[in-house]
Amino acid sequence: MKRLVVIGAGYAGSCVARMFRDQFDVLVLEGDSMPGGLCKSYYRDGLVYEYGPHILANHNCSEEAIAFLRSHVDTVDTKVTSASFVRDRTTWYPVHRRNAALLGLEAEVEAELRGLPAAPRMDNFETYLVDRVGRTLYEIYFADFTRKFWGVDPASLSADWARTRHLGESLDAEEMFFNRSWCAYPRGDWNDLFRNLLKETRVIYDAAVARVLPEERCVVLRSGPRIEYDLLLSTASIDFLFDHRLGKLTYRGYEIEPRVVDRPAWATFNGKPVSMTYYPEANVPYTRITDYGSFQRKEECPTYRGRTIVTVETPSASSELYPSTDRESLQLFDRYVRLASGYPEIVTFGRKGLYKYLTTDTATEMALRLRDHLFPWEALSSEARYAAYQEIRGSWNN
Ligand SMILES: Cc1cc2nc3c(=O)[nH]c(=O)nc-3n(C[C@H](O)[C@H](O)[C@H](O)COP(=O)(O)OP(=O)(O)OC[C@H]3O[C@@H](n4cnc5c(N)ncnc54)[C@H](O)[C@@H]3O)c2cc1C
């Protein structure tokens, strides 16, 4: 059996290790001391939280992908609700036309909405959203938030990013998009998912890969040993994989500060516990506070006997969570994919390997597309591999 070495035991690496364990002799190398990547559950004072909101949901994927996920973790159905704090008051989020009335802006916002084009301009993030919600709501809810989070002018981001995140679709929606389909939290915690995915797979922890040597078909661990492969599937950054030789890809993210708190006054809005409160205004340093007690294990929530755990999320340029979606970054990424396509024994995959915002459902969907292309990966021409990567990665909207 051929040896498949997988770099990374985050969701993408664990998912493919599970999917391909019958076709390959699989070995996973994980730099951390436990699996999960960004999907780990952590504990503080007995309360569980993740690194950002973590719910299992069906955003945009097939029943097959959801069935795969559900067969590896027991879940409790839940709902997430969100709100936005602007001008000293809690308002609906995603942005709703009711907010105009709450903010005393009904006449001007309604006039703007009547003048919107039938189809939004796809030039960039700003044109798309102005055409979806009007200039006034755009400025209040999206413009400063985007500058604060991304550190760039919103016009430099792609319209597809707004569309992928379902921004601006909610003026008349009764439900947040998450809640329109399946939405759940693990009955235990997220770590269970990784225990199940990897239970019959060899994984070496604390095994950070320092270098990949494609000519010798081996990786070199930071601690020294070399490990040989027949096929390498890397979920590390694609620029790392190639020694950053074309330049460094950029990301955006936030620092996350967990706090155990008494159930705060802002935790309900319109009679519902609020899971995520967004702070779009420029003078507030953070962008979001997430109350985990509002969506985990419903029977005990939202208060955990009067207490809950929240994370305060403050934008940071050094936190590599979200791939940048400006044209320059996507072009650099494209050059890396072309480079990767020339290596028949390497597959780059996952959030950083294919430089794409993923959730567990869309990562599963991506793994299913990889499965359709992997056999025989080595026999494909470089051009065919490049085309396969495009299909595997999918549009921003997958
Ligand atoms: C802020 C945020 C919130 C999110 N919320 C949700 C949510 O609510 N629901 C949801 O389903 N998904 C959510 N996601 C997505 C999810 O966390 C994962 O990003 C996604 O499933 C893809 O995971 P991945 O394995 O590609 O990447 P990662 O989770 O980053 O895993 C990569 C793994 O590779 C390892 N690694 C990297 N380099 C090396 C190396 N050189 N050597 C060895 N190991 C290495 C890392 O240690 C890590 O374990 C969220 C993501 C972010 C950023």
Image (cartoon, grey):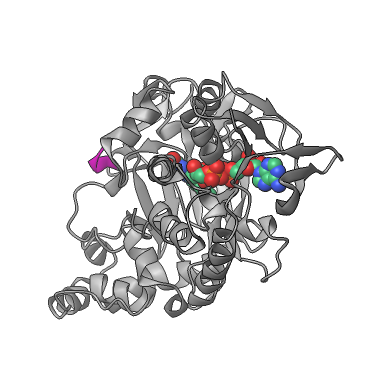
Seen from the viewer's position, the closer of residues 23 and 174 is 23
Q: Is residue 290 visible?
A: no
The answer to whether 91 appears left or right of 148 in the picture is left
- Expressed as whole percent of the image width and height from the top left, the position of residue 368 reads 38, 40
Report the number of discs: 0
- Expressed as whole percent of the image width and height from the top left, the position of residue 78 reads 33, 31
Q: Is residue 293 visible?
A: yes
The answer to whether 132 appears left or right of 146 in the picture is left
- Expressed as whole percent of the image width and height from the top left, the position of residue 57 reads 35, 38
Query: Magenta region: which residues?
Result: 179-183
* Name of the residue lying farthest toward the right: 224
The answer to whether 214 appears left or right of 39 in the picture is right
Seen from the viewer's position, the closer of residues 204 and 147 is 204
Residue 62 against residue 138 in the figure, above or below: above
- Expressed as whole percent of the image width and height from the top left, the position of residue 216 reads 75, 48
Residue 398 against residue 329 in the figure, above or below: above
Quadrant position of ligand 1? top right
Image quarter for residue 371? top left
Image quarter for residue 384? bottom left
- The residue depicted at 47 percent of the width and 57 percent of the height is 385
Image quarter for residue 389? bottom left
Per the image, is 158 magenta?
Answer: no
- The residue depicted at 27 percent of the width and 35 percent of the height is 63
* Name of the residue lying farthest toward the front: 379
- The residue depicted at 56 percent of the width and 19 percent of the height is 199
- The residue depicted at 87 percent of the width and 40 percent of the height is 224
* Quarter the N terminus occupies: top right
The answer to whether 176 appears left or right of 118 in the picture is right
